Amino acid sequence: MSASATVLAYRGEPKDTAEHFHGNHLLYLGWDRHLMFCAPVCVPLPPDTPFSVLTEQVLPAAYAQHPDFARIDWNRVEWLLDGQPFTPDPARTLAEQGIGHKSLLRLRTPGLDGLGGSAS
Amino acid sequence: MSTPTSAPKKLGLREKYARMTRDLAWEPSYQPKDKIYPQAGLEGIKIEDWDRWEDPFRLTMDAYWKYQAEKERKLYAIIDAFAQNNAQLNVTDARYVNALKLFLTGVTPLEYAAHRGFAMVGRAFPGAGAQVACQMQSIDELRHVQTQIHTISHYNKYFSGFEEWRHMHDRVWYLSVPKSFFDDAMSAGPFEFITAISFSFEYVLTNLLFMPFMSGAAYNGDMATVTFGFSAQSDEARHMTLGLEVIKFMLEQHPDNLPIVQRWIDKWFWRGYRLLTLVAMMMDYMLPKRVMSWQEAWEMYFEQNGGALFADLARYGIRMPRHWEVSVKEKDRLSHEAWATFYNYGHAAAFHTWMPDESEMAWLAEKYPASFDARYRPRYEHWIAEERAGRRFYNPTLPMLCQVCQIPMVFTEPDDPTTTCYRESHYHGEHYHFCSDGCKDIFDAEPEKYVQSWLPVHQIYQGHCGGGSVPEVLRWYRLEAGRDNLDYLSSPDRQNWQRWKGEAAAG
């Protein structure tokens, strides 16, 4: 016998569904091989935010302290959305291109390997 | 002369103990047992005969009070002497005191949670031997809370970051890691609770919590903390024995218990190991005089001692906890990843952070020859240069957290220490993110529990933490900005320390 029927029938209420965030969705952002930022970050954004706002405002606010940031060639950035290769359209909104609540967007910047090539 | 035959015979210890336990247990006649102990059957653990419970320590109440009172008289005499001699000035350096801040805010409230937890499971178990053992441990844990508060309260007179420890435990982002660990255990059933706390934590991992803090205190001149450590240690030996007895009892009672117990051991090893991340960074970074490295401690206390324990349990069918080999792969990076996290978010922590000096970097390079110079030194040298240029680095954006351990996603791939480890599950249309396979397994086994995690970053964005800006959140934490947080270099703690030590040298 495993756990009782009472335990198996238990249902919890998810704490972080989208309706709790005042119209925003949570977006997680990670910059590969730049572990000076100890973890990926979490930002709340309206789902109708154009993608260009990420590259022009959100990412600079998060990462501009890193000396590699100014050297990023945005045409060569490789994006991963929820684990899959992804080509963003800067003019379209996050929601229009499948970036949903609690999606994870990673960027890889070939040739930029962190402080002294240490992935920091 | 002969003794009058009417005098009552004095009971021997064994007899007294038997009266206290088995004689207190009676067969109920008004209510069926399953109504008196409704939680005992919820988890699927089958107990055929509670009388087969081997009491690991036969301690009677009068012996308990006498013995503990003696220990505490000694403890309080030493604390008094410590205070009268201003012995806080004898610690190696004021940086050390930050390890105590972490202990008081992160560990002491867990002792209180353990006091509550053992009282709860003592009520839930139908066997008298188990009830008494849990009651004794519950009282032990309450004494530990008290001695820790009394010892550390002396430091509160001289250093920042102590006075709101209880309030902080329920609110501050990194303290959700120890808090949620115990809440997870307490909201499980009684058998899982006791497996989690008595076996996985007290038996398998406690040496890695108490040894570093108490030896660290001894190495760094903090005799007050050493004393409460010693006072607690004799209790810990009993708690560890209870942990092992619990496992053996469940496994001997019914073969169906094995897979349930193994799953709990897998889960709670991983939960406990993730919690010890805080200890790893304390050992390698927060003690001005180091005892041993985290890597050395993990090798000695887990790989060798733990390995021997699990070899011994193999006759019951128990194997090593799942993902233990990941903990071995992480041993030369864990403390560095953790310290970098608190350096990133030092503006939101209730203790100070700093960069190791040159001699400390040399120690780290010697202890971690395969990882320190290649991966962590370049980061630190950059941060030191930034600080000297007036740009001390703080991470301006809140981190992504693991849904289970609640630690920011700072851990790296087991086979690639340069890449963040991302794991994910989809459940009822929602994304859930994890730092490791260990945490993902825990979620996947009980998703209805962990969808409810109170994740500090998400709670801030939902508006439940005093406001949306860092100053508002710090006020809600009762963390005084500019005094309790930020770099040690700019702290009032450091200024005071230099003044006191300078005056002491002049006098």
Image (spheres, coloured by chain):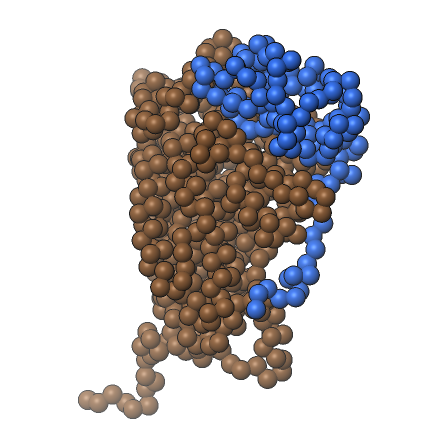
Chain colours: A blue, B brown
Q: Is residue A14 left or right of residue B264?
A: right
The foreground one among A16 and B138 is A16
Quadrant for residue B235, please give it: bottom left
- Expressed as whole percent of the image width and height from the top left, the position of residue B482 reads 56, 22
Residue B114, position in %: x, y? Answer: 50, 54
- Left or right of B163 on screen, residue B448: right
Q: To which quarter of the image does residue B381 belong?
A: top left
| Nearer to me, B210 or B79 | B210
Q: Is residue B251 above or below residue B329?
A: below
**Residue beneath the point at 67% across and 26% down:** A86
Q: Residue at x 40, y 29 (%)?
A: B285
Front residue of this view, candidates B208 and B410: B410
Could you say which quadrant of the image residue B405 lies in?
top right
Point out residue B404 in the picture as x, y percentages from the top left corner. 58, 44
Q: Quadrant of the N terminus of chain B?
A: bottom left
> In the image, what residue occupies the spot 52% across and 43% down?
B437
